[in-house]
Image: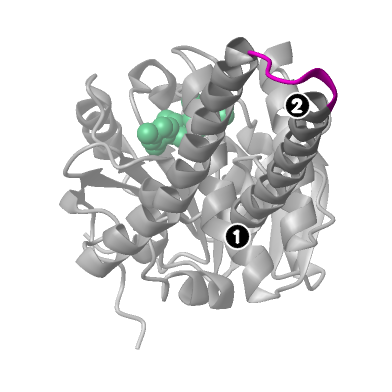
């Protein structure tokens, strides 16, 4: 069976989202059909441990516009999204989370804004339905990334975004491993717009980003787009040396005025402190070195295990 070549591709990374998928596809179809523009839904199963892939395969039997890409294992949300980009055929590509936190009914709003002449449109979750901790972490990271990239976008982490084909093609040229889409699009220098979108709590299942994962992902993002941590280490080192110099002056002064004295406790505390600072500094440097190690291996960013799809109509 052949399908109309889609104008809009909806890319959805999926990791353990089985209970959400039926409703997700229905809501996307419901939002897209009134637009009257041919579309496809490219779901990327990121090595789910539940039966997400099987559920998607079943939905596909009644909805041929749904394509299912299965990655060989769990690679992470960004690699899964890029795997979707590589498969997407539309002139416009929209990303959305599978957990229904972004209502698919907002997709037309993003597409309209893109039609106004933007290259990328990001959804701004003004009223986020996430935990306080999560919102605080996001605020901190938004501030840091905006400073580094010079971006003026309010909500960098939103999963609902729309891109022009030219942007997707340029994004897909990347070969490096640590990729974070807001930073990648800021780097491209394209015109980024923002629209306010509704946000809901997760329909079912759990967030894949607990506190530890959030810290890891955000640290990874900062190190991947900036050398600021190394500069910070240099500044901290200079400050600590100054303090050390001050302490030496003090000890010399005490020796001259009080003669011999024993300050073993102070010296050992200082040793511990300095050893700790040095280890933190070394580990930050190692972060950069290990990234060079990852990059020289030149492994693929993700591996596709299987694809379920129908061929589009040959319109040449
Ligand atoms: N996701 C993924 N691979 C992962 C982690 C997450 O494909 O390793 C998908 C997940 O299924 C969802 C989206 O990325 O569609 C966002 O994840 P989640 O909703 O857990 O993030 P949060 O909303 O808590 O930021
Ligand atoms: Mg979510």
Residue beneath the point at 20% across and 49% down = 308
Callout 1 touching callout 2 (CB < 8 Å): no
Q: Nearer the viewer, mark 1 or mark 2?
A: 2
Q: Position of residue 233 (x, y in %)?
A: 62, 48
Residue beneath the point at 19% across and 39% down = 73
What is the secondary structure assignment of the residue under circle 2?
helix
In the rendered view, does 293 fall on the left or right side of 25? left
Please tell me whether residue 209 is drawn above or below residue 74 in the rendered image. above
Q: Which label sits on residue 227? A: 1
Q: How many marks?
A: 2
Q: Residues within 10 Å of mark 2 (few under 14, many from 20)?
A: few
Residue beneath the point at 58% across and 59% down = 225
Q: Which residues are the magenta region?
A: 257-262
The overriding secondary structure of the stretch rendered in magenta is loop
Q: Can I make out residue 25 in this image?
A: no
In the rendered view, does 67 fall on the left or right side of 134? left
What is the secondary structure assignment of the residue under circle 1?
loop
């Amino acid at each position: 069976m052949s399908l109309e070549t889609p104008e809009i591709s909806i890319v959805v990374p999926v990791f353990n989202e089985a209970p959400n998928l039926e409703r997700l596809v229905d809501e996307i179809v419901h939002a897209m059909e009134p637009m009257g523009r041919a579309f496809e839904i490219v779901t990327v199963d990121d090595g789910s441990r539940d039966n997400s892939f099987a559920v998607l395969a079943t939905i596909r039997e009644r909805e041929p516009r749904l394509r299912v890409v299965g990655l060989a294992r769990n690679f992470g949300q960004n690699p899964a999204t890029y795997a979707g980009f590589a498969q997407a055929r539309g002139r416009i590509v929209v990303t959305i989370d599978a957990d229904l936190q972004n209502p698919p009914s907002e997709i037309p709003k993003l597409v309209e804004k893109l039609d106004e002449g933007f290259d990328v449109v990001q959804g701004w979750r003004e009223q986020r339905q996430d935990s306080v901790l999560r919102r605080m972490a996001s605020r901190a990271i938004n501030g840091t990334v905006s400073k580094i990239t010079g971006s003026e976008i309010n909500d960098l982490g939103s999963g609902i975004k729309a891109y022009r084909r030219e942007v997707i093609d340029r994004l897909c040229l990347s070969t490096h491993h640590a990729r974070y889409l807001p930073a990648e699009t800021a780097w491209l220098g394209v015109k980024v717009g923002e629209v306010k979108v509704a946000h809901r709590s997760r329909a079912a299942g759990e967030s894949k980003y607990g506190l530890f994962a959030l810290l890891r992902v955000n640290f990874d993002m900062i190190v991947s787009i900036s050398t600021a941590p190394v500069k910070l280490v240099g500044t901290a080192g200079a400050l600590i040396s100054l303090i050390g110099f001050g302490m030496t002056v003090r000890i010399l002064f005490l020796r001259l005025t009080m003669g011999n004295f024993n300050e073993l406790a102070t010296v050992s505390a200082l040793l511990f402190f300095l050893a700790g600072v040095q280890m933190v500094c070394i580990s930050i440097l190692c972060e950069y070195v290990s990234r060079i190690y990852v990059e020289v291996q030149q492994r693929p960013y993700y591996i596709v295990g299987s694809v379920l799809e129908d061929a589009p109509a040959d319109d040449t």
